[in-house]
């Protein structure tokens, strides 16, 4: 019926990754069709996307919003059916018609629909790093059990995937890989005097020098928690211990990450900082398609710089390594405390330089325990949100 087209569900269609995904889809109408688009509350934006891409389904969080969107689409002659709630997210992520699931919801809310796609054995294009941080072991088990394909969208992990040997199947023991070098831009405050960090505003933190992204991940980049979450994500995706994952600050964001081999080779993936490259790579894999990205001009770039990360400036990065080494529910606790602290900072209720204290104190308050089931993970997530919430009230302004 779709003449060989791949049908795509985009979870988080109205976000930064979702919009870039739909841009790639629109460049290749012969290859891709849209099965479902989802958003949290952005009814207007989802309405426009439905008119353009004509999905079979659209999903919003609240029933009232879904009814509103349905009547607007009906009046416009668009036959998309609108659903609401978390159950509907899981349905459109696992429906038999779907080939590719772009998991691009931000935060813990993305875990359940991403897992639903894994359980249904889909090709999952994973942008939602928080899902792997919270429950990496369970997620990877589900992927292995169903034969789902997990392709990383995060530019660093996509770069690593591209630099790994062909046929690599999670677990690098026999492939001669010694280390992964995860590059980081260092964000907007790499050189800012430390005493000025207290006065950083949300808009300053969201003004990333190289990438245009959603507000939560932009703040994570400014604290380097984003890189910390990515260290944990790399651990689960590629099966290396924390000692095998090194962060390298590379302010130009041209090398998206590197893999170091026993024989001294280091293989890097380069490109302009545009998420449409990893998105197009994962969507067409193993083919290569036009992503609409400007070709890399090395003469214009002229130089590539590297620095060691400063853990005193970026305590969140150290906290992420600590959580990975602790294991069990610690990464889920780290993630939940970070979501609470960043949310509060974005609303003007917490100083930028206190985000790391909220996370550290939450980790201290929750004793280590195993993360053997989703219930245990969600329990830890809930507990961490409560503790972080009260810490934020104590430390907040
Ligand atoms: P964003 O804030 O721009 O978009 C988030 C999307 O998720 C929106 O469509 C929103 O409606 C939806 N959403 C938010 N909360 C939801 C909820 N509770 N329930 C259902 N849907 C919800 O975020 P983004 O920058 O596109 O990032 C999305 C994910 O991709 C994040 O996990 C981020 O870490 C990851 N990522 C983003 C980039 C980037 O360049 N933006 C790069 C690498 C990884
Ligand atoms: Mg990244």
Image (spheres, helix red, strand yellow):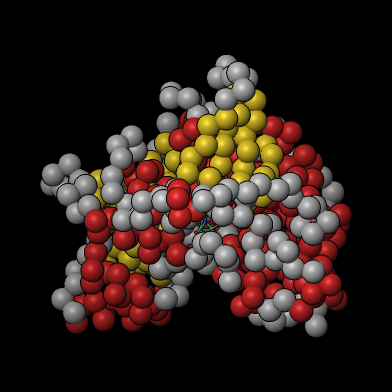
At a point 22% along the width and 65% down the height, the residue shown is 54
Residue 355 position in % (x across, y down): 76, 67
Is 272 above or below relative to 61?
above
Residue 343 position in % (x across, y down): 65, 72
At a point 74% along the width and 68% down the height, the residue shown is 192
Task: Determine which quarter of the picture holds residue 37.
Answer: bottom left
At a point 49% along the width and 53% down the height, the residue shown is 301
Is 65 above or below relative to 176?
below
Is 54 above or below relative to 364?
below
Is 136 or 67 nearer to us in this picture?
Answer: 136
Tell me: 190 left or right of 105: right
Tell me: 235 left or right of 323: left
Residue 176 position in % (x across, y down): 59, 19
Task: Determine which quarter of the picture holds residue 315.
Answer: bottom right
Kindly tell me whether residue 380 is visible in this rendering.
Answer: no
Residue 310 position in % (x across, y down): 78, 52
Tell me: 69 left or right of 134: left
Kindly tell me whether residue 23 is visible in this rendering.
Answer: yes
Tell me: 57 left or right of 247: left
Q: How many marks?
A: 0
Is 324 or 301 nearer to us in this picture?
Answer: 301
**For the C terminus, which image quadrant?**
bottom right
Is 93 or 33 nearer to us in this picture?
Answer: 33
At a point 33% along the width and 34% down the height, the residue shown is 286
């Amino acid at each position: 019926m779709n003449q060989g087209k791949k049908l795509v569900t985009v979870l988080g269609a109205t976000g930064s990754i979702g919009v870039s995904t739909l841009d790639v889809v629109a460049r290749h109408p012969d290859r891709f069709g849209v099965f479902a688009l989802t958003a949290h509350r952005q009814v207007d934006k989802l309405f426009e996307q439905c008119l353009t891409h004509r999905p079979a389904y659209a999903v919003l969080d609240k029933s009232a919003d879904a009814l509103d969107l349905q009547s607007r689409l009906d009046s416009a002659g668009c036959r998309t059916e609108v659903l609401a709630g978390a159950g509907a997210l899981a349905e459109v992520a696992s429906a038999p018609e779907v080939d590719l699931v772009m998991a691009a919801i931000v935060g813990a809310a993305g875990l359940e629909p991403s897992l639903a796609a894994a359980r249904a054995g889909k090709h999952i294009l994973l942008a939602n790093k928080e899902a792997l941080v919270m429950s990496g072991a369970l997620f990877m088990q589900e992927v292995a059990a169903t034969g789902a394909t997990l392709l990383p969208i995060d530019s660093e992990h996509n770069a690593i995937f591209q630099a790994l040997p062909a046929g690599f199947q999670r677990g690098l023991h026999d492939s001669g890989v010694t280390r992964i070098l995860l590059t980081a831009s260092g964000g907007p405050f790499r050189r800012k005097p430390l005493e000025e960090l207290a006065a950083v505003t949300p808009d300053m933190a969201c003004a990333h020098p190289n990438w245009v992204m959603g507000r939560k991940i932009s703040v994570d980049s400014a604290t380097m928690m984003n890189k910390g979450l990515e260290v944990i994500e790399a651990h689960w995706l590629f099966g290396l211990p924390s000692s095998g994952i090194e962060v390298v600050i590379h302010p130009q964001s041209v090398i998206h990450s590197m893999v170091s081999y026993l024989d001294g080779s280091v293989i890097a993936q380069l490109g302009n900082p545009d998420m449409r490259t990893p998105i197009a790579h994962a969507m067409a894999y193993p083919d290569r398609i036009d992503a609409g990205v400007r070709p890399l001009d090395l003469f214009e770039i002229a130089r590539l710089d590297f620095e060691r990360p400063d853990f005193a400036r970026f305590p969140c990065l150290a906290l992420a390594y600590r959580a990975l080494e602790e294991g069990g529910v610690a990464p889920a606790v780290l993630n939940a405390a970070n979501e609470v602290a960043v949310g509060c900072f974005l609303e003007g209720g917490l100083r930028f330089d206190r985000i790391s204290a909220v996370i550290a104190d939450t980790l201290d308050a929750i004793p280590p325990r195993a993360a053997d089931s989703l219930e245990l993970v969600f329990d830890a997530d809930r507990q961490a949100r409560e503790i972080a919430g009260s810490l934020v009230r104590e430390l907040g302004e």
